[in-house]
Image (cartoon, grey):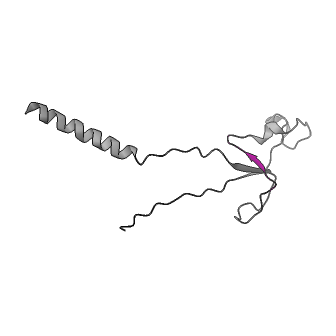
Amino acid sequence: MKMRLWLLPVLLFYNSVVAQSNFIRTRSFNDGWKFFLGDAPADEPSFPDNNWLKLNLPHNWCIETLFDSTNPTGTGCGVLRGGIGWYRKAHYEKILVDANT
């Protein structure tokens, strides 16, 4: 009898862990981004981004520019170009719908 009482909580715990593991999915969101250095109306979904740089995150556009002491950011930014840059990514998620609802 004691064996059964000990076994019941273990089986219930195992069952809950197995049930939860079926719903966990992890996926990196860092791949497949596009970047444009400058200002653009890129908040519009229909904005064309065909010529944008394709990259993965993390990304820092400053290290891709040349050092220039005449940059408006001055020496506070290490004389690297600052400014506005746009990152975009189209993300589509499959939604599973329960047929019983």
Give the residue at x 60% y 46%.
29
Query: Which range is magenta?
Result: 50-58
The x and y percentages for residue 67 are: 88, 35
The x and y percentages for residue 11 are: 23, 38
Give the residue at x 28% y 38%.
14
> Is 71 or 16 nearer to us in this picture?
16
Q: Give the left or right position of residue 97, taking residue 93 as reference.
A: left
The x and y percentages for residue 32 are: 68, 48
Q: Name the quadrant containing residue 30.
A: top right
> Is 31 or 71 nearer to us in this picture?
31
Q: Main secondary structure of the magenta part?
A: loop
Q: Give the number of callouts.
A: 0
The x and y percentages for residue 22 are: 40, 46
Q: Is residue 26 magenta-colored?
A: no
Please determine whether, in this image, residue 4 is positioned above or below residue 36.
above
Q: In which quarter of the image is the C terminus?
A: bottom left
Q: Give the left or right position of residue 33, taking residue 64 as reference.
A: left
The residue lying furthest to the front in this view is 99
Q: Give the left or right position of residue 4, taking residue 47 as reference.
A: left
Give the residue at x 48% y 46%.
25
The residue lying furthest to the left in this view is 1
Q: Quadrant of the N terminus?
A: top left
Please determine whether, in this image, residue 5 is positioned above or below residue 27.
above
